[in-house]
Every structure is written in structure tokens, then in C-alpha cells.
Image (tube, rainbow, N blue to C red):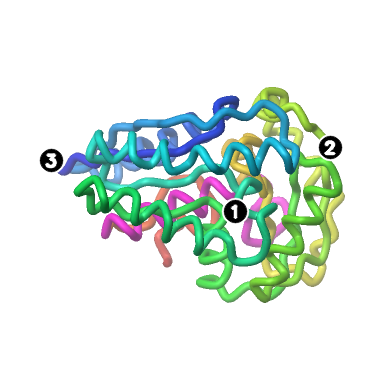
Amino acid sequence: MEHFRVGQIVPSSNTTMETEIPAMLTSRYELFPEERFTFHSARMRMMHVSPQELKKMDIDSDRCALELSDARVDIMAYACLVAIMCQGAGYHKVSQERLGKTVASNQSTAPVLSSAGALIDSLNLLDYKKISIITPYMKPLTQQVIDYIEAAGIEVVDSISLEVSDNLEVGRLDPMNLVAHADRLNIGQADGVVLSCCVQMPSLPAIQLVQERLDKPVLSASIATVYQMLKSLGLKAQVPNAGHLLSGAF
């Protein structure tokens, strides 16, 4: 039996990543009965998704990485996409390098990734040049996310902003409402759809349904995070009913 400890650095008001990541990884047990995962989190204070709170929160990520490295986790993810993307193009590389050094200073060899970096890296792996996205953010923050993605060479052809600024309320959004929202997206030129371009907005139950309905590949920031976690751990990137990226083909 192989045991893996999965660490997440999350905003204090985030509830979704500690739900969706375990749901995806434990759903693998029937496919890979020799695997077992445990889940460990450290929290950065944040209640409202505003640029000011996000930048203040990001400073706490070093403390969180150090605390998680005490638990000798096997993989660590900075699980807040917009906190990275509102800091300017390419910041996920800066953040991951800094947190990696923090972890290494505590004699830990755990790879450090981020949801922001995982999404960009996964879109590049899939060779998607154009995407459509749904976010829970206020429109100015969605624009910062679009700018970040486009700075990485991927065009955002359409976006829907649900304009929910309270992070707790974002976590309470019904993922099945994304089915109707996705129907409103312009996807004609898109190579794929990011159904939740936010790790706090729940989407996992809707991913496979929307993918079949739109006949386009569908992923989310949390799905991209799981993909990169599995690849970093040297495991097959396959999760049942979790869309194209986690079909096992990549």
C-alpha cells in the first residue's frame, strides 16, 4: 500500500478545495486500490475577495508552507488561484520558487505547486490556444485573471463573472447552476472550457455533465491542481467523472 500526504495552503474562508481534492483522489481507490491519501491544510486569513485582502493574505503563504513541511507532506499546493493571478503575469513561478525554498529550509523535499500555475501548465499541456471561463469574481478581478492567462499566451474568448465577493458565499454556490451558466458561454472558437476558474467555486459534480452537453473538453482550477499533483507524485493522472484532463489520456 502506498500512502501519500497531500498538503494545501488555503484561504481561511476556503471550504471547496478541502472537499473537491479529497473527493477526486479518494475516488481513485477503486481504480488504484494500492493507493491511500491523507489531507492536511494550513490557512491564510481572507474573507473578501478583494485585491487588498488577497495581497495581504499572500504574505502568509510562507508561514503555511513551513507549517505543512513540518507534517512531511509529499506534495503541497497553494490553493488560491486569484491571489496569485492578481499579483501580475507569471507570479506563480515567483511564488512557487519562494515557497520551495521555504520548504527546503525545513529539510522537506515536497514539490510545491499552485492552482494558478497548475491551470496554466495544464492548458499548455493540452495545447489550448483559446478558452472560455466562468468565475465567481467581480468583473475587475475576472479581468485580472484574463490578463494573467493571456500573458501566458492563451486567449480568453469569453468569460462570465458571477460577481460574488464574499468568499464564504462563493463556497456555497450550487455547482449544478454552472450547467445553465455554461450554456450562455460563447464557446464556438474555444478549445476548452474552464468551468470554475476559481478553487473556491464548487464545480466537480457538473464537470462531466457540462463536457457531454457542450461537446468540448471541460476542466476547472481544482482539476488542474489534481492533475499536476498526480504527475508530481509519479501517479497516473486518472480520476473517474472528472473531465478530459483526468481521463487518463495525459
Q: Position of residue 213 (x, y in %)?
A: 71, 51
- The crowding category of the residue bearing disc 3, from other C-alpha atoms within 10 Å (few below 14, some 14 to 19, many at least 20), is few
- Region rendered in magenta: 208-234
Amino acid on which disc 3 is placed: Met
For label 2, the SS is: loop
> Residue placed at 62% from the left, 38% from the top?
56
Q: Residue at x 60, y 52 (%)?
A: 84
From the image, state whether disc 3 or disc 2 is nearer to you: 2
Q: Quadrant of residue 48?
A: top right
Relative placement, left or right, of 11 versus 187 is left
Residue 1 is labelled as 3
Q: Which residue is mark 1?
A: 219
Task: Look at 44% across and 49% down and name the residue there.
Answer: 226
Q: Earlier in the sequence, mark 2 or mark 1?
A: 2
Amino acid under disc 2: Glu
Say which residue appears at 43% left-offset and 43% top-offset: 62
- Amino acid type at image mark 1: Leu
